[in-house]
Amino acid sequence: MKQVKLKDKEFRLSYPEAEIQSDIDLLASKINHDFGRNKDIPLFLSVLNGSFMFTADLLKRITFPCEISFIKLSSYQGTSTTGKVNQLLGLNEGITGRTVIILEDIVDTGITLTKLHEELTKLSPRQIVVATLLFKPEAYKGKIKIDYIGRSIPNEFIVGYGLDYDGLGRNLPDIYTVI
């Protein structure tokens, strides 16, 4: 599909599935290199809902012992951020003294990431590392270091591969940009 329509908006193909998978291969390779020799068993913390596809594909490529957990945070309504982060589903694992690797589908303004980082820091992890499939440097207002970036993209609204427009489009294997 070169274009899709979701509700009242048209989207054009911008990031085919093959390129997404190639970027995930590179991310996994870097993470495996950096953490594969550690005795520490890191906790991958996937930020739902958007990162579920990225998390599944990335973790299939991780070659060292690890744990995975999920947290649900939201700051979007429609095509723009509300500026307020709502924690909807919490963390059940203890992270004191552990390495936590946050998995994000996309980092744009950094509002969600900043709030999550603040909350995790209160729980005294050994370190917090951030991996994101997509990064919007033009939109980023945060100060948290993004350790692993799959691809930097323009500050445009996108859907597909876990990303949605009012709940639609998450199931698309490719990523599309609003027209």
Image: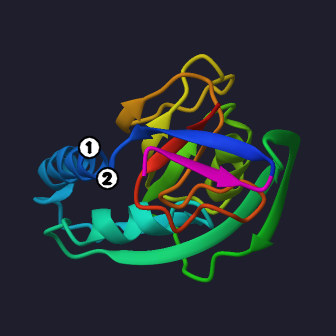
**How far is the residue under mark 1 from the one under mark 2?**
5 Å
Q: Is residue 137 above or below residue 110?
A: above
Packing grade of label 1 (10 A; few <14, some 14-19, many >=20) is: few
Residue 51: x and y, percent?
A: 52, 61
Q: Position of residue 122 (x, y in %)?
A: 69, 56
Q: Determine which residue is flagged by label 1.
A: 19
Q: Indicate whether 74 appears above or below 53.
A: above
Q: Quadrant of the C terminus?
A: top right
- The reply to whether discs 1 and 2 touch (Cβ–Cβ < 8 Å) is yes
Left or right placement of residue 130 versus residue 11 in this view: left
Residue at screen point 57% across, 59% down: 124
> Which of the 4 image quarters holds residue 26?
top left
Query: Could one spot residue 130 in this view of the protein?
Result: no
Residue drawn at 58 percent across, 60 percent down: 50
Q: How many numbered dots are placed on residues in this image?
A: 2
Which label sits on residue 17?
Answer: 2
Secondary element at image label 2: helix
Q: Vertically, is 25 above or below 145?
A: below
Amino acid identity at mark 1: Glu
Identify which residue, 73 or 160, lies in the foreground: 160
Highlighted magenta segment, given as a residue range: 1-7
Residue in the picture at 55% in, 27% down: 136
124, 42: nearer the viewer: 42
Instruction: Tell me if residue 4 is in the magenta stretch.
Output: yes
Place of residue 157 in the rendered image (x, y in percent of width and height, measured from the top left): 66, 36
Side of 142 relative to 83 (left or right)? left
SS of the residue at dot 1?
helix
Is residue 65 found left or right of 7 in the rendered image? left
Model colouring? rainbow
Q: Check residue 63 in the rendering and tell me which mark sits there, or answer none.
A: none
Give the amino acid type for the residue marked by disc 2 in the picture.
Answer: Glu
